[in-house]
Image (cartoon, rainbow, N blue to C red):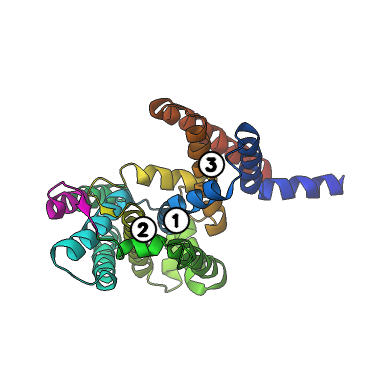
């Protein structure tokens, strides 16, 4: 009996990985093109940005907040880096740093509204979402900005080992360590679990609330730059709806929107689960609009599985 309980607990604790593995096997069976080097490489290149956005979103969710501005901040990162390089002849490395700095400022502004002016995360990030999208449209004049070869597209070059994949893996490892093995990670989770108790222990909660939005802004900007690198175009329209995919990835990964619970590793798997759904539907030539319906129902099923297994743990 105890052995069965142990097996059940292992299955419950790892349901995110089980869902992903089952979906991966189904995709392999549905299309012979799925399990090919080119397709798997394309999934990794396509998901480098969304994975970073999901990780940034997780940091905010762990504190009990939400960041709806990530898609618009992605657009700012893409647009600003492109305009700096194409119109002002700024070296591409410096253009990336400037864009990242602006993304950090936008994240800090959202965090300031939440931490120091007591805005709800939903309201503060909704306002910054609108502001950031307006900035992206303004600096590009709502027109795609073409980039020269040998600039941002270097980040997707096979010759250099696909740098955006390498950077994404490094970022994932950094945030796994940050979440699991540092005082910062433990305090962020504690803030989401019981912020009042954390305050009473003498910890400056506001600083931690501000910091997670800064992290989210930084990672969203980097994701926007990655998308510009893949297409060699800076675009003010990128990232639309990305905040919803990021939230879905966190929830599929077992994060609680109430805060205090979540895992970087499982969030990454959640993002890849969404990627598999989109990829297999494209391979099966499912039209774009029905894809949204199917994807929505699959997300509902995945989240229901999380809810049921969480209930069984209690």
Q: Nearer the viewer, residue 248 or 209?
A: 248
Does 14 lie within the magenta span?
no
Which residue appears at 42% of the width and 26% of the height?
A: 287
**Tags 1 and 2 touching, CB below 8 Å:** yes
Of the residues under marks 1 and 2, which one precedes in the sequence? 1
Q: Residues within 10 Å of mark 2 (few under 14, many from 20)?
A: many
Residue located beneath label 3 in the image: 276
* Residue 226's disc number: 2
Which corner quadrant holds the C terminus? top right
Q: Which residues are magenta?
A: 133-147
User: Which secondary structure lies at badge 1?
Assistant: helix
Of the residues under marks 3 and 2, which one precedes in the sequence? 2
Of the residues under marks 3 and 1, which one precedes in the sequence? 1
Q: Nearer the viewer, residue 52 or 160?
A: 160
User: Which secondary structure lies at badge 2?
Assistant: helix
Residue located beneath label 1 in the image: 48
Q: Give the x, y percent position of residue 127.
A: 22, 49
User: Which secondary structure lies at badge 3?
Assistant: helix
- Alpha carbon distance from label 1 to label 2: 7 Å
Q: Note whether 71 is above or below 299 in the view shown.
A: below
Q: Residues within 10 Å of mark 1 (few under 14, many from 20)?
A: many
Which residue appears at 73% of the width and 50% of the height?
A: 10
- Alpha carbon distance from label 3 to label 1: 14 Å
């Amino acid at each position: 009996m105890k052995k069965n309980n142990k097996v059940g607990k292992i299955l419950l604790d790892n349901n995110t990985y089980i869902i992903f593995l089952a979906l991966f096997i189904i995709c392999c069976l549905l299309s012979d093109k799925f399990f090919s080097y080119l397709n798997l490489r394309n999934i990794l290149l396509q998901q480098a940005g969304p994975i970073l956005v999901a990780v940034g979103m997780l940091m905010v969710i762990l504190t009990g907040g939400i960041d709806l501005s990530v898609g618009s901040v992605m657009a700012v990162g893409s647009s600003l880096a492109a305009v700096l390089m194409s119109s002002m002849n700024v070296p591409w490395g410096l253009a990336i740093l400037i864009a990242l700095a602006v993304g950090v400022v936008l994240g800090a502004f959202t965090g300031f509204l939440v931490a120091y002016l007591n805005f709800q995360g939903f309201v503060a990030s909704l306002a910054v979402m609108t502001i950031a999208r307006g900035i992206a449209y303004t600096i590009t004049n709502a027109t795609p900005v073409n980039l020269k070869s040998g600039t941002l597209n270097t980040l997707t070059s096979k010759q250099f080992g696909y740098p955006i994949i390498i950077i994404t893996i490094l970022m994932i490892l950094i945030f796994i360590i940050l979440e699991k093995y540092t005082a910062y990670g433990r305090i962020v989770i504690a803030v989401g679990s019981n912020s009042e108790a954390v305050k009473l222990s003498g910890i400056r909660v506001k600083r931690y609330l501000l910091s997670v939005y800064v992290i989210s802004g930084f990672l969203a900007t980097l994701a926007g730059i990655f998308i510009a690198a893949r297409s060699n175009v800076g675009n003010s329209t990128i990232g639309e709806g990305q905040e919803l995919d990021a939230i879905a990835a966190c929830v599929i990964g077992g994060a609680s929107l109430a805060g205090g619970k979540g895992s970087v590793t499982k969030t990454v798997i959640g993002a890849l689960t969404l990627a598999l759904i989109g990829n297999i539907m494209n391979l099966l030539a499912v039209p774009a609009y029905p894809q949204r319906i199917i994807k929505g129902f699959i997300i509902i099923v995945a989240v229901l599985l999380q809810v049921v297994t969480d209930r069984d743990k209690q």
